[in-house]
Image: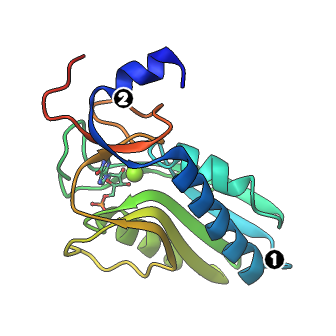
């Protein structure tokens, strides 16, 4: 790994998922979607910024024609606990009526983000809606989300890397890890 990345990894208490583990699981998720959605044109609705690498890696493994909308959603505003209020910026031309939709996010935690977004998506009457996340936290949800696939179930700890940040940092880590409570840098 480049020395700049090794420096950032010192800020981790431990590595939870290695790049190889993530890649193998994303490949398996894509294979399942390829089997289930053969012959369809899929409209992907991808949540940014945390989903950046998951979405980029998964989409390149999908074999059907794909349209892409990216949404910016935030409920954390820099900390490690949700504020409960979900802010979403919707593209002006957003229209999924009658389409086969795949909603993608990095991590399912309280469920508030995905349930708020799913409600808005279903209001537009898509032909179908699938929801997949890379990580699902083992914890009580504040809002129910009908999940079709989750890459990994993880404990209720704050994770960074592979797109996910803490105060804007650590997104570029190729692995997923638990942050050191007293980061050196
Ligand atoms: P929820 O609305 O389900 O509580 O939270 C979903 C969003 O919160 C995720 O899309 C993600 O952006 C953020 N989030 C939840 N848990 C974590 C975490 O452990 N680390 C980071 N970096 N973001 C998280
Ligand atoms: Mg997110």
Q: CA distance from mark 1 to mark 2?
A: 41 Å
The residue sitting at the left extreme is 182
46, 107: nearer the viewer: 107
From the viewer's perspective, tell me whether residue 19 is left or right of residue 154.
right
Residue 1 higher or lower than 14, as above or below = above
Residue 165 is situated, as x and y percent measured from the top left of the image, at: 35, 37
- Give the numbered dot on residue 40: 1
Please tell me which residue is depicted at 43% across the width and 66% down the height of the picture. 152
Q: Is residue 49 left or right of residue 42?
A: left
Of 130 and 58, nearer the camera is 58
**Secondary structure beneath disc 1?**
loop
Asked where in the image residue 126 lies, by quadrant, the reply is bottom right
Residue 23 in picture, x, y percent from top left: 60, 53
In the image, what residue occupies the spot 19% across and 25% down? Answer: 183
| Front in this rendered view, residue 11 or 42 | 11
Residue shown at 76% from the left, 80% from the top: 35
Q: Ligand 1 within 8 A of label 2's CB?
A: no
Q: Position of residue 4 (x, y in %)?
A: 46, 16
Name the N-terminal-most of marks 1 and 2.
2
Location of residue 173 in the rendering, given as x and y in whole percent from the top left corner? 45, 33
* Residue 95 seen: no
Element on which disc 2 rests: helix
Q: Is residue 76 above or below residue 103?
A: above
**Up/down of 2 relative to 138, above or below:** above
Of tags 1 and 2, the one toward the viewer is 2
Q: Quadrant of residue 78?
A: top left
Kindly identify which numbered label has been placed on residue 134. Answer: none
Q: Which mark is residue 9?
A: 2
């Amino acid at each position: 790994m480049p020395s700049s990345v090794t420096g950032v990894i010192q800020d981790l208490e431990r590595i939870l998922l290695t790049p190889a583990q993530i890649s193998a699981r994303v490949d398996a998720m894509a294979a399942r979607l390829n089997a289930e959605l053969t012959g369809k044109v899929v409209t992907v609705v991808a949540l940014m910024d945390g989903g950046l690498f998951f979405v980029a890696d998964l989409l390149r493994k999908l074999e059907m024609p794909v349209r892409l909308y990216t949404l910016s959603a935030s409920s954390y505003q820099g900390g490690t606990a949700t504020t409960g209020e979900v802010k979403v910026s919707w593209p002006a031309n957003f229209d999924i009526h009658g389409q086969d939709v795949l909603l993608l996010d990095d991590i399912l935690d309280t469920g508030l983000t995905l349930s708020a977004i799913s409600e808005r998506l279903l209001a537009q009457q898509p032909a179908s809606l699938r929801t997949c996340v890379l990580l699902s936290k083992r914890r009580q949800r504040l809002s129910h989300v009908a999940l079709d696939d989750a890459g990994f179930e993880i404990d209720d700890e704050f994770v960074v890397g592979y797109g996910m940040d803490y105060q804007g940092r650590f997104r570029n880590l190729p692995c997923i890890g638990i942050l050191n409570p007293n980061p050196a840098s």
